[in-house]
Image (cartoon, rainbow, N blue to C red):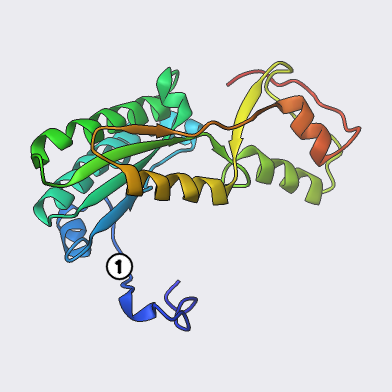
Amino acid sequence: MDNEYKTHPQYNKLRFFIGDVRDAERLKLAMQNVDYVIHAVALKQVPACEYNPNEAIKTNINGTVHVINAALETNVKKVIAFSTDKAVNPINLYVGTKLVSDKLFCAANAYSGADGTRFAVVRCSNVAGSRGSVIPFFKNIISNGGEELPITDYWMTRFWISLEDGVKLVIHALENVRGGKTFIAKIPSIKITDLVEAILPGCRKPEVGIC
């Protein structure tokens, strides 16, 4: 990433750190003289989180605590955390950790005082084409010669947001955050069968069931 942005006119304002949200001291160093922080770190693969629950908790919950504490100690102005629309009604460990993360972020405003760091959450839905999502999964099947796309349930729907609109939502939250708020965009939904038909028209659609 450092090499990619070397020719950018604002390159002199960029710093690149190797680190981990599990490392509280490293986060404090990274946030020195920083005004705004976007917390987008999470283990989000549902099966991986179910198989490694302690690791999911260390990153998604303990890591969030470290982000909050580092921001408070370095006097960051505003911090926005990415969440998921599925945190409304958790049904697995991943979304359970995201709900806890949301609660921690909103409560953090009580520690910063009236004029201190402001914390807020943005709840995105499925970011179209993001790593680990169903669209790259389907495309990978097709690129390997697959002629059918498995789906979980014929009646299942998904809310979708583009990467660009997701970025706009974060910027909106930064501009309007007053602390303790959760920003949710009004976005369209699509049936999973319609998505499959758009990606590979006329293909077979075996129903594999909800995991």
How busy is the neighbourhood of tag 1: few (under 14 within 10 Å), some, or many (20 plus)?
few
Q: Position of residue 118 (x, y in %)?
A: 21, 43
- Closest to the observer, 176 or 2: 176
Pick out the residue farthest to the right. 202
* Residue shown at the point (37%, 47%) measured from the top left: 41
- Closest to the observer, 195 or 174: 174
Is residue 124 shown left or right of residue 162? Answer: left
Amino acid of disc 1:
Phe
Q: Is residue 149 visible?
A: no
Residue at which label 1 appears: 17
Compared to residue 169, the image places residue 185 above or below, namely above
* Residue shown at the point (16%, 51%) measured from the top left: 70
* Residue shown at the point (50%, 31%) measured from the top left: 47
Q: Position of residue 126 (x, y in %)?
A: 56, 36
- Closest to the observer, 155 or 206: 155
Asked which quadrant contains residue 26, the reply is: bottom left
Q: Position of residue 164 (x, y in %)?
A: 56, 51
Is residue 24 shown left or right of residue 98? Answer: left
Is residue 123 shown left or right of residue 54? Answer: right
Is residue 129 shown left or right of residue 34? Answer: right
Q: Quadrant of the N terminus?
A: bottom left
* Residue shown at the point (20%, 40%) measured from the top left: 65
Asked which quadrant contains residue 123, the reply is: top left
Asked which quadrant contains residue 25, the reply is: bottom left
Pick out the residue farthest to the bottom. 7
Compared to residue 57, the image places residue 66 above or below, namely below
- Closest to the observer, 202 or 118: 118
Q: Does dot 1 land on a helix, a strand or a loop?
A: loop
Compared to residue 179, the image places residue 19 above or below, namely below
Q: Is residue 138 visible?
A: yes
How many discs mark residues in the rendered view?
1
